[in-house]
Amino acid sequence: MQQSLSIQHLLDELEKLPGIGPKSAQRVAYYLLNSSAEEANRLADAIRTVKERVTFCECCFNYAEADLCDICASDRRDESMICVVCEPRDITAIERTNEFQGLYHVLGGSISPLQGITPADLHISELLSRLADGKVVEVIIATNPDVEGEATAIYLSRLIKPLGIKVTRLASGLPVGGELEYADEITLGRALEARREL
Amino acid sequence: MQQSLSIQHLLDELEKLPGIGPKSAQRVAYYLLNSSAEEANRLADAIRTVKERVTFCECCFNYAEADLCDICASDRRDESMICVVCEPRDITAIERTNEFQGLYHVLGGSISPLQGITPADLHISELLSRLADGKVVEVIIATNPDVEGEATAIYLSRLIKPLGIKVTRLASGLPVGGELEYADEITLGRALEARREL
C-alpha cells in the first residue's frame, strides 16, 4: 500500500491509543487531514500542555496542575471523609455522581501479587499519615469490585479500623469483575449511598 | 465535576474526533497522562508534522508530501487506467486490495444538490485534462455506491464516453448505501475485478 510517510507515522501513533484500531485510526487521521491546521494543532497542543502542566497532588495523588489538586485545595469539601480509589480516573467517575463531598486518596493501583504490586508500591503510608491528626471520621474504600480491589479493601480496613476510624466499602450493585471507571452515574451513586461497613 | 483545566481541554479536543465519545476520550486522555511525556509528544508531533508536510498531489489530488503523490510519481503504475474516487481515503482502501496497478483521480467529493456540491466544486475539469492526451484507455469510476456516488458516476460517464474512452464502474457486491472506506479487502477486490461498463 502506498501511503505518505507522515500519514503512516500518525496512523502508527494513533493505533497505540486504547480502543483505537486500524480503522478508527484511519478515520481520525483523515479527519485531521481534512481539518484546518489550526484545529489539528489545537489537539497537538492540548496533548503537549497536559504533559507539561499536569503532575500529582502532593496530598492525595490525584492529577493536579499545582501542588494540590482542585479538590484538596477547595475549602468546600468535607475534611472528615476520605474516599480511597485506585486511579485518578476513578475520582472523575465518583465526582460525576455528585453524591460525595469529601476528599480523596489515590493508591496508584491495587494489591496484586500476580503483577508484583505489593502494599509498599501503593500510597498507603501517605494515607495513614493523613489519618493521624484525628480529623477523619470515615474512610470509604472505592477500589474496583474485583479480586485485587477486594483484597486491597480488606488490607486497608485492617490497618485503619484499629485507629478508631469507620471504614466503609462501596455497596454491591456494581457488576462484580467490572471496572469502576465504566459504571454509569446512577449505579455508582447508589453504590456510594448504600456503602457498607467493613 | 472537579477536573484539571488542561485535562478538560484535552478531553474537549479528543471528543471532536470522529468515533470518539466522552468515555473513549477519557480513556485516551488517562492513557496519555499515564504514558511518558516522550510517548505522548510523539503523537502531538505526528499530528503537527502531518499538517505541515501533507498537501495535495498536483496531478490526482491524493494526499502528497511533494508536488506529486507516491502513486503519480511511481514509474511502475499503468498509465492507461485511471480510477476515479471521491476522497483520498478511498485510494488507501483500493490499494489495500492489490488488484489495481493504474493511477487515481480524487474528485474531492460527489455531486450532491442537497449539500450544494455541483460538478464545478469537484476536480472534474482536471480529470478531463488528464484524459486529453489519449494515453488513457479506461476510466474506472469508484465513487461510493450511494445516490450521490451513482449520480456522479453517470455524470462522469456522459462526459468521458464521447472521448472514446472505456468507462467502467465497480461491480455491485458492495453493500448499497454503504461507504467504500469500510468495505473489506476481499469484497472490494471482487467488486474491482467484476467491474461493469456503463
Image (spheres, coloured by chain):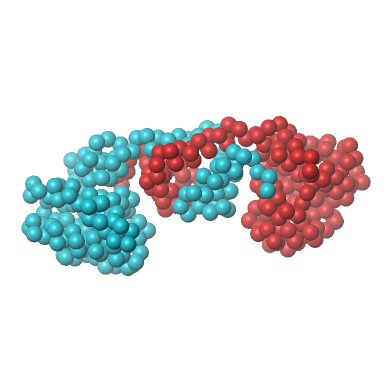
Chain colours: A cyan, B red
User: Is A177 placed above or below A142 here?
Assistant: below
What residue is shown at x 92% (from left), y 46% (from top)?
B164
Residue B181 in the image: state x and y as whole percent: 65, 53
Q: Residue at x 25, y 41 (%)?
A: A57
The residue that appears at 79% across and 40% down in the rendered structure is B75
For image coordinates 83% across by 38% down, the residue present is B130
Q: Is residue A191 above or below residue B95?
A: below
Is A96 on the left or on the right of B96, as rendered?
A: left
The answer to whether residue B184 is left or right of residue B197 is left
Does residue B190 appear in this view? yes
Image spot of residue B23 (x, y percent): 42, 53
Q: Position of residue B17 (x, y in %)?
A: 51, 46
Q: Quadrant of the C terminus of chain A?
A: bottom left
> Is residue B121 visible in the rendered structure shown here?
no
Q: Is residue A74 left or right of residue B22?
A: left
Classify residue B162 by image quadrant: top right
| Closer to us: A46 or A4 | A4
Quarter occupied by residue A94: bottom left
Residue B197 on image: x %, y % = 85, 56
